[in-house]
Image: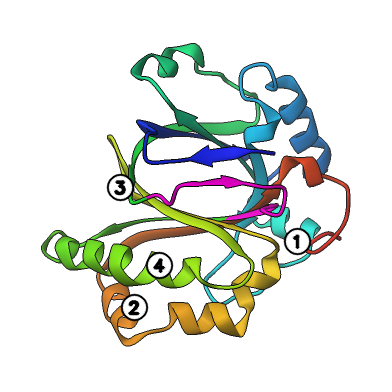
């Protein structure tokens, strides 16, 4: 796995496939989707997981995907023409969504195999608080999280169109990083508590890399 986000990146493209909650044996279904889509959406760019509320431990694997299984592909765009190379796809039993973003101070880093988990947070913010929100995110929040042991990289992005407008990606060594005392200290500040009051439509997903499917390890059943 070698995902790269750098200051030369023109944009970020994400594709998500949300499974129908009525599907039986979601683990098998996730694997079949990854296999069926691998020529359009490479599995090395794929992450699999479910929703996890802030300050909540990541549940075991079966419980995590039972909460709302999702495959999340993250790709960087190096040229304006790259977007046409990946046609829209439709997968039965899935709700598909594609978004494009431009980076907001994404940290330049090649993510090694140590970054086997990803926390993705999307949100909007009240219009009259957007300037303070961006100052807080860029000046305090992302820099503090980036120093936490186990955090491989952190970056934030703004949607080219559509809502929620903002996306933050935190690549980590494992789910325990997201519940560590150092992480809590970095994310629970007076300024953070103030800005959270202005956030809207917050969504937080925790994923593990698709290469870990059925390998066990932290967060597995």
| Residue 24 visible in the displayed image | no
From the image, tell me which residue sits under label 3: 165
Image quadrant where residue 94 sits? top right
Foreground disc of the pair 2, 1: 2
From the image, tell me which residue sits under label 4: 143
Label 2: few (<14), some or many (≥20) within 10 Å?
A: some
The residue sitting at 66% across, 53% down in the picture is 115
Residue 84 vs residue 6, the one in the foreground: 6
Relative vertical location of residue 23 with respect to residue 127 in this rendering, above or below = above
Cα distance in 3D space between marks 2 and 4: 13 Å
Relative vertical location of residue 193 with respect to residue 89 in this rendering, above or below = below
- x, y (%) of residue 134? 24, 61
Cα distance in 3D space between marks 4 and 1: 31 Å
Q: Is residue 217 left or right of residue 187?
A: right
The residue range painted magenta reads 106-118
Secondary-structure class at tag 2: helix
Residue 24 vs residue 65, the one in the foreground: 65
Cα distance in 3D space between marks 4 and 3: 20 Å
From the image, tell me which residue sits under label 1: 63
Label 4: few (<14), some or many (≥20) within 10 Å?
A: some
Foreground disc of the pair 4, 1: 4
Nearer-N-terminus badge (4/3): 4
The answer to whether mark 4 and mark 3 are in CB contact below 8 A is no
Tell me the tag on residue 192.
2
């Amino acid at each position: 796995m070698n995902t790269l986000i750098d200051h030369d990146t023109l944009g970020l493209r994400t594709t998500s496939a949300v499974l129908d909650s009525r599907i039986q044996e979601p683990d098998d279904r996730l694997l079949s989707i990854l296999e069926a889509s691998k020529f359009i959406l490479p599995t090395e760019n794929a992450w699999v997981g479910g929703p996890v509320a802030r300050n909540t431990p990541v549940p075991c694997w079966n419980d995590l995907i039972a909460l709302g299984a999702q495959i999340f592909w993250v790709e960087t765009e190096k040229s304006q023409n790259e977007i046409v190379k990946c046609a829209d796809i439709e997968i039965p039993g899935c709700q598909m969504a594609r978004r494009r973003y431009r980076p907001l101070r994404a940290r330049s880093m090649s993510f090694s195999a140590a970054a086997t988990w990803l926390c993705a947070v999307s949100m909007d913010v009240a219009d009259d608080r957007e300037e303070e929100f961006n100052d807080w995110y860029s000046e305090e929040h992302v820099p503090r999280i980036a120093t936490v042991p186990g955090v491989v990289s952190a970056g934030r992005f703004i949607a080219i169109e559509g809502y929620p407008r903002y996306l933050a990606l935190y690549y980590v060594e494992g789910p325990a990083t997201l519940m560590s005392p150092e992480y809590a200290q970095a994310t629970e500040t007076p300024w953070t508590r103030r800005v959270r009051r202005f956030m809207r439509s917050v969504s937080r997903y925790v994923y593990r890399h698709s290469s870990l499917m059925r390998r066990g390890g932290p967060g597995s059943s």
